[in-house]
Amino acid sequence: MKLNQNYFNVNDSYLFSDIAKKVAAYQAANPQKKVLRLGIGDVTLPLAPAVVAALHSAADEMGRRESFRGYGPEQGYPFLKEAVRGYYDERGIRLDGGEIFISDGAKSDLGNILDIFGQDNVVLIPDPVYPVYVDTNVMAGRKVTYMNATEENGFLPMPDYSVDADIIYLCSPNNPTGAAYSLQQLKEWVDYANAKGAVILYDAAYECFVSEDGLARSIFAVEGAKACAIEFCSFSKMAGFTGTRCGWTVVPEQLAGGKANRMWLRRQTTKFNGVPYIVQRAAEAVFTPDGRRQIAGNINYYMNNARIIARALEELGIWFAGGKNSPYIWLKCPGGMGSWQFFDYLLENAQVVGTPGAGFGRNGEGFFRLTAFGSEEVTREAADRIKRLLLK
């Protein structure tokens, strides 16, 4: 037996596991203090009523012989694929049903998609970045190069034609920085990828939070993108499916002359048995009129939380990105503190938990991520605690 030695090149622990251990140790030593969590990007609002009703109805179907379903199509039931296709149609983006693949979430597919690409591809990833992009490629033994996302470029790096790459990761609105690309900026990336013969793996998990005109919600709104991009999206943050698990991936027929689409279909039919029927019915309900209205209310709730945090930082004179088109607020640590130093300072003096920017890459040092996914009550109290602490 020989183990995959590339796993030894990955950090021993996951960023959020380190945070959980620190918080647990603090709470054990200070049981009388209430800790407020604005760290991990998990949702807190319950599933929308339309979604819950669909879950109940589908569960009832599974309990009757005449409507019971066993194995479903690995790429997703037609009813959900058609609902997703209609979601893109609303924005003038035309997709074929065969280009849409239903999954158990964007995180899974962002890692699994690498199965269809050779090991010798050079990967270009922004820094700072969602750790999964890096770790999955390191596990596979690929060469990873980085593009610098910094305060100077608004944490939105642009293509450099002197750099060669085969696989490019873009996330907009970005996790962790909350920065969002405009359609014009994405066009530059599409032109670069087509010129280099590269593929863009575009993470659109937070597209539903974009409200400003001119900002991208799908890379396929850009001319030429179907020849060079794969898009990943999720119901996790859009509809609170973090514990229900469902998403989709779009692999255009134009990419690699249709080979990428056929290879992904082959991969999925071999390694994946599909998302449960009841979950897909729940996801379909997201796109109904009632579902859309209820979910818009949840999104507005989280974005109001983002505004609460943003106002507190503005009053403190702290630089930050995000918060306007993203549930993430990416702030510059005050007083020149390092990311983990500020984490400890907030936890010990205000009992507020965030995410150290250094955990997302070298360029994240000196920055800090707060999320708007808590309750309004917790968000307001956390913002007040931060203000009281930093105004001293």
Image (spheres, rainbow, N blue to C red):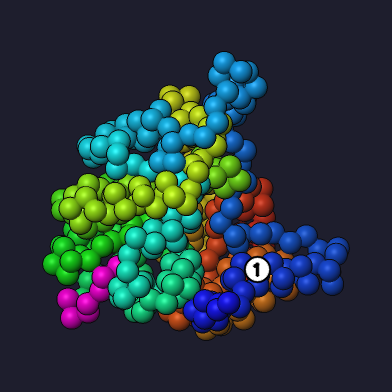
Q: Is residue 179 left or right of residue 379?
A: left
The residue that appears at 59% across and 36% down in the rendered structure is: 47
Which of the 4 image quadrants contains residue 102?
top left
Task: Depth check: give the residue in front, 44 or 61.
Answer: 61
Whole-percent x, y for residue 78 in the image: 38, 30
Q: Is residue 141 left or right of residue 147?
A: right
Task: Depth check: give the residue in front, 91 or 118.
Answer: 118
Q: Is residue 109 left or right of residue 88?
A: right
Residue with the mark numbered 1: 17
Question: Does the magenta-highlighted stretch encompass residue 163?
Answer: yes
The residue that appears at 47% across and 52% down in the rendered structure is: 271
Q: Image height check: is 41 above or below 104?
A: below
Which of the 4 image quadrants contains residue 126?
bottom left
Question: Does the magenta-highlighted stretch encompass residue 99?
Answer: no
Q: Give the extent of the magenta segment.
A: 161-167
Whole-percent x, y for residue 71 in the image: 52, 35
Quadrant occupied by the C terminus: bottom right
Q: Is residue 45 left or right of residue 182?
A: right
Whole-percent x, y for residue 369 in the image: 53, 66
Q: Image height check: is 95 above or below 237?
A: above
Secondary structure mainly formed by the magenta segment: loop
What element does badge 1 sit on? helix
**Count of marks, rendered view:** 1
The residue that appears at 48% across and 56% down in the rendered structure is: 107
Task: Depth check: give the residue in front, 243 or 67.
Answer: 67
In the rendered image, is residue 285 in sight? Answer: yes
- Classify 10 Å Cα crowding around label 1: few (below 14), some (14-19), many (20 and above): few
The residue that appears at 17% across and 53% down in the rendered structure is: 257
